Image (tube, grey):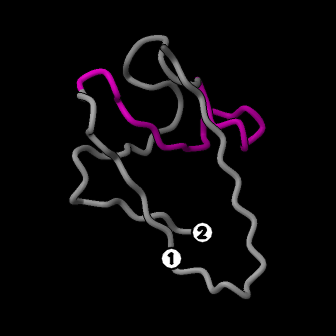
Amino acid sequence: CTLKYDWNATFQWTKTSGKTPTENTGPTYDHTTSYSVTGSYIYIEASPQIPGDAARLFSDWMEPNEVVCIQFWYHMHG
């Protein structure tokens, strides 16, 4: 599955591996790669944002008659 940034959104998601740049706020690794720091994940830096700001991702079109499985894992601090 390929996700695309919404470049018209207020702020953007960031792809990274290992820890997030802000101390103690994110996961230390992508859990889907057997707890390896070589995996990657996306995150948003929410601290500088204000209510109403949005960071969006889009997927390719999925036909209604397709069998689709979407998994979403999250880590939240604060």
Q: Write down the residue under mark 2.
A: 1
Q: Write down the residue under mark 1.
A: 60
Of 38 and 42, the residue lying toward us = 42
Magenta segment, principal secondary structure? loop
Whether residue 54 sits left or right of residue 78 in the image: it is: left
Q: Quadrant of the N terminus?
A: bottom right
Of 4 and 63, the residue lying toward us = 63
- Tell me if mark 1 has few (under 14), some (14-19) or many (20+) residues whose alpha carbon lies within 10 angstroms of its own: few
Q: How many marks?
A: 2
Residue 45 pos. (x, y %): 35, 29
On the image, which quarter does residue 14 sit in?
top left
- The residue at the point 63 percent across, 86 percent down is 63
Marks 2 & 1, CB-CB < 8 Å contact: yes
The answer to whether 70 is drawn above or below residue 29 in the figure is below
- Tell me if mark 2 has few (under 14), some (14-19) or many (20+) residues whose alpha carbon lies within 10 angstroms of its own: few
Q: Amino acid at mark 1?
A: Asp
The answer to whether 22 is drawn above or below residue 60 in the figure is above
Q: CA distance from mark 2 to mark 1?
A: 8 Å
Instruction: Looking at this view, name the residue that lies furthest to the front.
Output: 52
Residue 65 pos. (x, y %): 73, 88
Of callouts 2 and 1, which one flags the residue occurring earlier in the amino acid sequence? 2
- The residue at the point 48 percent across, 63 percent down is 3
Of 48 and 21, the residue lying toward us = 48
The answer to whether 10 is drawn above or below residue 19 in the figure is below
- The residue at the point 34 percent across, 27 percent down is 46
Disc 2 element: loop
Mark in the foreground, 2 or 1: 1
| Magenta stretch bounds | 28-48
Q: Amino acid at mark 2?
A: Cys
- The residue at the point 61 percent across, 30 percent down is 29
Asked if the magenta segment contains residue 32, the reply would be yes
Disc 1 element: loop
